[in-house]
Amino acid sequence: MEYLAQIVPVMAEGLKVTVSLFCVVLVLSIPGGMILAMIRMSKLRVLARIVAIYVYIMRGTPLMLQLLFIYYGLPFIPYIGIQFDDATAAIVAFVMNYAAYLCEVFRGGIQSIPKGQYEGAKVLGFTYFQTMRKIIIPQVIKCVLPPLANETINLLKDTSLVYVLAMNDILRIMRGIVQRDFDTSAFFVAGVFYLLMTFVLTRVFSYLEKRYAVYDE
Amino acid sequence: MSFISMQHIEKSFKGNVVLKDVSLEVNKGEVISIIGPSGSGKSTFLRCLGQLETIDKGTIMVDGLCLVKTGADGKAVYADKKTQRALQIRMGMVFQQFNLFPHMTVLENILIAPKMVKGMKEADILPIAERLLKKVGLWDKRDEYPSRLSGGQKQRVAIARALAMNPDIMLFDEPTSALDPELTGEVLRTIQQLAEENMTMIIVTHEMAFAKQVADKVLFMADGLIQEEGRPEEVFDHPQSPRTQAFLQSML
């Protein structure tokens, strides 16, 4: 018990890193994914094709590889040669990756809205922008909530990958403690931290789903 | 000059000719029924007027305003966006599949367009919405979501929603085709009522008895052409064209 009281506050420091990375990435990748989805479905053929290729690359390679490439690889690319600090590199890599996944989630959502909804809005005189804002997007949100909950929980767990960049998130601190003390309690503490966070997320999403369930399709 | 004038409309979808050369004149307050077999182009023709399809060739004039005309190169040239939208707002359209907004209550469905499109205040629209919902007999359902309504109720809400924009013309695209037979009556009565109020209407329908009863003029379309048109009793009781005769025979 005394040992726990000693390691929990240390690991809670790692929690801050994990949570702030999670929040920043989520806030940036949701609009990012939405914009990518709109481009991908637009009539701008060339741009749509580029987004499709981008999504293929982001989904087709390990997130770990993308993370390592952006942190260690980019500085050595001729002419580009950007050196990000660890937090920035992590954010860039995660947002790029998650925006690609969310692009597909939103694309699926937007395509599930029947054509009649656009026509119903058009004959009432709605502009394209009004149609999207008042008619299409609210319905898309309802039907993307379950896959969005999936991706959000995945993201929370994926943030643990930043330990390769020497960022002191929960997992890296945990590893340090285990190696120092030869005691496995830290594994359990880390597990409980993640479970608590996913519990909160699950509750948030089931609240949202309930709120949107007042109407059926 | 007639209120709506559609001249020599041509339209094809990827090489498949749907409208060959269709013309129609509608006077103010007139009710037109368009009948014909599936795939005859009658819905497409209505959708061209409702600006849900663009035509390849031809002229559409509404109340002296030109929506589209054939240009020097023989292709249809549309008016600017502002004119298109102005004409759009003057036409109400009712669909086979209702197309109500499922995430809004009945009342919200009625209020949204006048609010968003015309910029009206909610306090000004509410009495109109109340009058319209009472007219279609659904004021007590105002706080329900569309999924809780029967098909006939949905369609009556859709009619009220279109009327809330105070249109000059109502377009009906097979308004009863998705309904169970016992529910068509309530929708047809609502449309009948509009006809009695001298609303200008074009109705694409498979309800022959209704078409005959409500319309001032009936058009029979087949193969992208108007095969026959005239007063209901002429078309239904004394059809001249063999196509019309065959079609009406098959409907009995």
Image (cartoon, coloured by chain):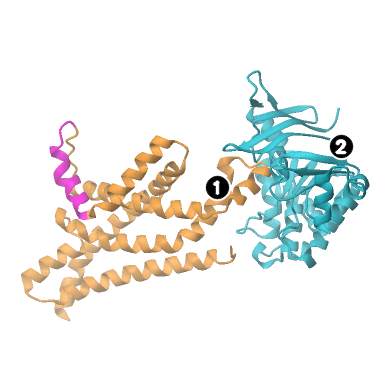
Residue B201 in view, yes or no: no
Quadrant (top left/top right/bottom left/bottom right) for the N terminus of chain A: bottom left
Q: Nearer the viewer, residue A98 or B50?
A: B50
Q: Nearer the viewer, mark 1 or mark 2?
A: 2
Is residue B101 a member of the stretch shown in magenta?
Answer: no
x, y percent for residue A67? 20, 50
Question: Taking A73 as reference, is B22 left or right?
Answer: right
Magenta stretch, main secondary structure, is: helix
Quadrant (top left/top right/bottom left/bottom right) for the C terminus of chain A: bottom right
Picture colour for chain B = cyan
The chain that hosts pointer 1 is: A
Picture colour for chain A = orange
Secondary structure under badge 1?
A: helix
x, y percent for residue B59? 73, 28
x, y percent for residue B193? 88, 53
Q: Residue at x 79, y 62 (%)?
A: B184
| Image mark for residue B28 | 2
Taking the view exactly as shown, the residue that stands out farthest to the top is B72
Q: Which residues are magenta?
A: A64-79
Q: Residue at x 77, y 43 (%)?
A: B221
| Image mark for residue A133 | 1
* Above or below, A203 relative to A31: below
Question: Taking A90 as reference, is B51 left or right?
Answer: right
Res B32 quadrant in image: top right
Question: Hey, what amino acid is under mark 2?
Answer: Lys
* Above or below, A178 relative to B164: below
Estimate how packed mark 1 is, as few (under 14), some (14 to 19) or many (20 or more) residues with alpha carbons within 10 Å. Answer: few
